Amino acid sequence: MTVSYSLKDIAEHIGADVCGDNDFRISGISTLRLADTNELAFLANSAYRQDLERTKAGVVILSPEMVEYYSGQKLIVTNPYLGYALATALFDRAPVAVPGIHSSAVVANCANIDPTAAIGPLAVIGEGVTIGANTRVGAGTIIDNNVAIGENCRIAGNVSIYHSVVLGNFVTVHSGAVIGADGFGFAQHQGRWIKIHQLGGVVIGNNVEIGACTTIDRGALADTVIKDGVIVDNHVQIAHNVQVGENTAMAAFTGISGSTTIGKNCTFAGRAGCVGHITLCDGSHLTGGTILTKSLLEPGSYSSGTMFSKTREWKKNAVRFNQLDDLAQRVRQLEKKL
């Protein structure tokens, strides 16, 4: 069934001013290049202004600065990308779960599941688990003993949540994620490794999103803590006892070593990482591939590594990097002579 909305309805939903027919119907969202006459598009980056001239979209979300460059119907908002984000909620085609427990699910007698929650096929719910109102648990997901999950959460299929983990409200966990696995803790003794049992848990706040195949380890003694509004991409590793501040974002393949404390509103681009036992202040931003080896006490953008180049040139420069210390000492000697 095709769902459509009037221009007026969409404008009210995203907080936009209408320039066009309030009753015009929109049945989808697409890019400027691919949009059809019954679809909504947006322009959030002026680099794509040439696409605005050729688009077939029925309506375009624009900033006030871009209005003069488009003569068609438009929705005018200060932040077109935010307007687009809000509009996507109207056209989300994800299946709606039916409240109740599937007949093939295995649920402990002492689990406390709200009647409005939905538990999918072959899910396993352990003893002492609590699941709040309107929360959805996907097929094949395993929730171990004494886990607390809040309201309006979406736990996708094939997620593993270990014992004594706490999730707040409006938390999304994508398939393959593992929350509460043992942290990497071992002690050396006579040439062999002795396991340190991880006695803490994981506490996740409200409005958190955790990507597919991401792992968040439980704490060794205290809990690993992910605070409100944090967004974590696919294939991210967060080690034991890490603390992640509000509204921090981590892109794919980020790796955070144990006992690192991360402030609010930080960002980690792809393949960024931190050594353990350091602190990042609020507003710290790591660019792609950056490896942080000491604490950051001043907000800003930080980078490490070298820029890419042709392999032949990169090899030459790599040799020169190894010569920098010798070069620095020679410069000091010359400065003393001068």
Image (spheres, rainbow, N blue to C red):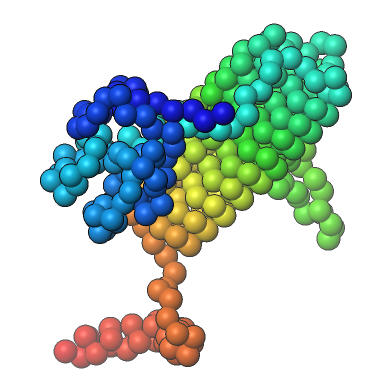
x 40%, y 26%: residue: 5
Q: Depth check: give the residue in front, 270 or 197.
A: 270
Q: Quadrant of residue 120?
A: top right
Q: Quadrant of residue 324?
A: bottom left
Horizontal and vertical percent position of residue 319: 47, 88
Horizontal and vertical percent position of residue 102: 80, 20
Horizontal and vertical percent position of residue 294: 45, 55
x 74%, y 14%: residue: 100
Q: Depth check: give the residue in front, 13 or 134.
A: 13
Q: Is residue 100 left or right of residue 168?
A: right
Instruction: Residue 160: tell me if it is visible.
Output: no
Q: Quadrant location of the C terminus? A: bottom left
Q: Quadrant location of the N terminus? A: top right
x 20%, y 90%: residue: 337
Horizontal and vertical percent position of residue 296: 38, 50
Q: Depth check: give the residue in front, 209 or 296.
A: 209
Q: Is residue 107 left or right of residue 254?
A: right
x 19%, y 32%: residue: 19
Instruction: Residue 333: tell me if it is visible.
Output: yes
Q: Quadrant of residue 39?
A: top left
- Depicted 57 relative to depicted 145: above or below: below
